[in-house]
Amino acid sequence: MPQTTMTLRTDSDVKARFDSFCADVGMNASVAINMFMRATVARQALPFQVRRCTPEGLRDIDAMSHEELLALLDARKKRFQSNDLHPRSLDDVLGELKDDIHHGQL
């Protein structure tokens, strides 16, 4: 198969750390980038999840791991207990939890 050259720009520190990682696993940057491109073409998707950037503190509750969600619920429970709040409906509590996540309070 014919070869071609590709040029890209990156941060020098990132390149140095990437080169170091590649050397540690027995390859060079060219091999790693080729692996990335081949995996992308084979899957017809990037070989990792890409999400849009969100404002600081904004979290997507649907994208959280089970452990992250349990930690958030536990923090909310502790906050509820410390404030001596009266019980509310589950919908109200979940709505407040989402509000807290969006405002970076958890």
Image (cartoon, rainbow, N blue to C red):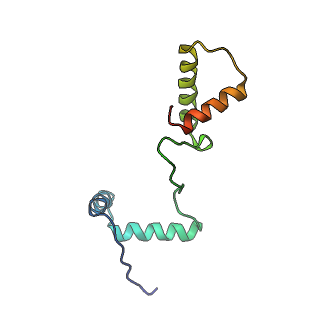
List the single residue furthest toward the top: 84
User: Considering only vertical position in the picture, is 62 above or below 34?
Assistant: above
Is residue 17 toward the left or the right of residue 56 in the image? left
Q: Position of residue 22 (x, y in %)?
A: 32, 61
Q: Position of residue 74 (x, y in %)?
A: 55, 24
Instruction: Out of 27 and 98, give the one closest to the viewer.
Output: 98
Is residue 4 toward the left or the right of residue 60 in the image? left
Is residue 26 toward the left or the right of residue 63 in the image? left
Instruction: Out of 45 and 12, give the one closest to the viewer.
Output: 12
Residue at the (55%, 71%) spot, across then down: 41
User: Considering only vertical position in the picture, is 79 above or below 46?
Assistant: above
Q: Quadrant of residue 19?
A: bottom left
Residue at the (40%, 84%) spot, across then down: 4
Instruction: Out of 49 and 58, give the one closest to the viewer.
Output: 58
Residue at the (66%, 14%) spot, across then down: 86
Q: Position of residue 38 (x, y in %)?
A: 50, 70
Residue at the (48%, 70%) spot, across then down: 37
